[in-house]
Amino acid sequence: MKIRRLVALGCLVVVVIAVAGCGLPIDNSPQAIPADEMPLALSESNATIPSVSRLLGSIPEEIYLLGPDAQLVGRIRYLRPPPTPQGMLDALETGPAPTELDQGIQSAIPSSANLIAGAQTGGVLTVVLDSSFGSPRPGQATYEFAQIVYTVTSLPQVHGVLFEYGGAIIQPVVGNGSFATSFVVHRADYAQLVP
């Protein structure tokens, strides 16, 4: 009789231990999810969140939009690390958040734009423009180029920008409204647009 009770008690202990082992692990602090284990719905895009909210593990980066006075204004977007030129361009394409629109902040970048980060050599990034830039709105070309240049040069590895359109390198419009004297443009070429 005692042996049966001991066996039954032993079986009960094994069942309780097995059931307890099926629970979720408990950590003392948050743990990063490896990229290869990230759920697809969370990892599809390296794009940004247009509002000031952020996801765990994201880092703040500055994109440039246009303030009510037609001057460049930096706005924070949260990107998945490490920040890339393409991630910055994707963030710029999303334009202002609703709260920023309420403050009179806009973007000269066409809403249909598809900006592509091309090759980068010696700190100079090539940005490929699509057909939405074929006929910029009057007076907007300067602002479009300025927003792109200031946004991608927020990254420490990018110092200058080349623009490609239709398979050819083009001379962009600079801050004073004239065409650049060089194919490579820098922040200094748009100094007039910064408060």
Image: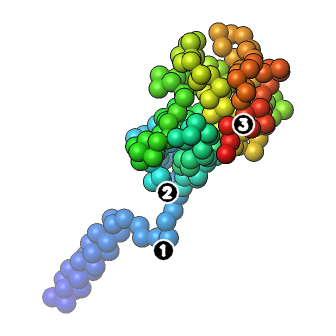
Left or right of 146? Residue 105 is left
Q: Mark 3 points at which residue?
A: 192
Image quadrant for the C terminus?
A: top right
Q: Where is residue 157 in the image (x, y as percent from the top left)?
A: 76, 41
Question: What kind of residue is marked 2?
Answer: Leu
Q: Mark 2 points at which residue?
A: 56
Q: Is label 1 in a helix, a strand or a loop? A: loop
Q: Residue at point 47% right, 52% down? A: 52
The residue most toward the left is: 1
Q: Is label 2 in a helix, a strand or a loop? A: loop
- Of callouts 1 and 2, the N-terminal one: 1
Q: Residues within 10 Å of mark 3 (few under 14, many from 20)?
A: few
Q: Mark 1 points at which residue?
A: 28
**Front position among marks 3 and 2:** 3
Q: Residue at point 62% right, 40% down? A: 72
Q: Position of residue 123 (x, y in %)?
A: 80, 35
Question: What kind of residue is marked 1?
Answer: Asn
Q: Where is residue 182 in the image (x, y as percent from the top left)?
A: 83, 21
Q: Residue at point 78% right, 21% down? A: 180
- Of callouts 3 and 1, the N-terminal one: 1
